[in-house]
Amino acid sequence: GPYLEIELSRSNVATTPEDRHRLRNLLGQHARQWLQRTWPAWKEQDEDHARLEHSMSLLAEFQYGPGYPARLSPLLDRLSENFRRNVSHADPLALASFLFKTRGLSGAEKDYHNPFHSNLVYVIEEGRGIPLSLAAIYMLVGSRLGLDIGGINFPGHFLARARHQGNLYVVDCFNGGRFLREQDLALYNRGAAGTIADLINAPCPAETIVARSLRNLNHAYRQEDQPENAALMEELLHGMHAPNIGGR
């Protein structure tokens, strides 16, 4: 049944990546049913970052299965604790340097459309992700440190927005935590400067980020020829009634 991986873990049965891949195929239907059943729980969280973290945790567990030892929240806790131990002052600029330079989280240059690049547990452990997953880690670690870090739902390339000492910083987490100016953003989007300014300042709640993550996964699963998983992501997305502003 769906708890085969848990029983293997309890029995100290070692599994190779190939074993886990075969288990994913065997247990795929169970995993999809589990996600459909548990998915509404993330919307019940009171705080925006808590909703984002809960939804990302559910997607990671869906991909890895219940027997996988790592969980998102403890991994985020560990990152914030490591930052506190190694950095004397907590601000968004220092955190970006820690995550994307010292810790080495970076954009996935190869196998870009791998669905696991949307899995925050995978991204933390393997160090590679897409713009949205890397920005989400930046936001969720930042929330543990009391920092004002949000998202920018920029078309084609998700960005982070950090406020510090009255200044607003746009952070490209995919490219080493690079700080962008408004003229840099014109290279991503040939639209008018006013439109770019509106995007930078527009609210980007958890619901917007989750919807974009589901679009990314839908596309990735189609690229990987996993139509059942792609259909599930589309089903969850339709239940949110979110506007489409692109992916990644």
Image (cartoon, helix red, strand yellow):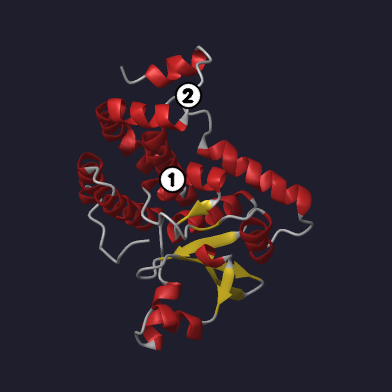
Q: Residue at x 30, y 26 (%)?
A: 27
Indicate the amino acid at tag 2: Thr
Can residue 45 be seen at all in this image of the molecule?
Answer: no
Q: Is residue 43 above or below residue 184?
A: above
Point out residue 73 in the picture as x, y percentages from the top left corner. Answer: 54, 39
- What residue is disc 2 on? 15
Q: Quadrant of residue 165?
A: bottom right
Packing grade of label 1 (10 A; few <14, some 14-19, many >=20) is many
Q: Position of residue 74 (x, y in %)?
A: 58, 36
Observer-nearest of 51 and 122: 122
Taking the spot 31% from the left edge, 52% from the top edge, the residue there is 220
Q: Which residue is at a point 62% across and 62% down the rendered structure image?
A: 96
Disc 1 secondary structure class: loop
Name, please, the residue furthest toward the top.
11
Residue extending farthest right: 88
The residue carrying mark 1 is 119
Q: Residues within 10 Å of mark 2 (few under 14, many from 20)?
A: few
Query: How far across and down, in percent of the image, does residue 116 sit?
Result: 41, 45
Question: Which sits earlier in the primary sequence, circle 1 or circle 2?
Answer: 2
SS for callout 2? loop
Horizontal side, residue 26 vs residue 120: left or right: left
- Frontmost residue, 125 versus 149: 125
Q: On the picture, is 85 further left or further right than 13?
A: right
* Whether residue 230 is visible: yes
Instruction: Give left or right: position of 9 versus 93.
Output: left
- Report the residue at 45% width, 16% height from top: 8
What's under tag 1, amino acid-wise?
A: Asn
Establish if 64 lies above or below 212.
above
> Which disc, if any, is residue 28?
none
Res. 33 image quadrant: top left
Which quarter of the rendered picture does the C terminus lie within? bottom left
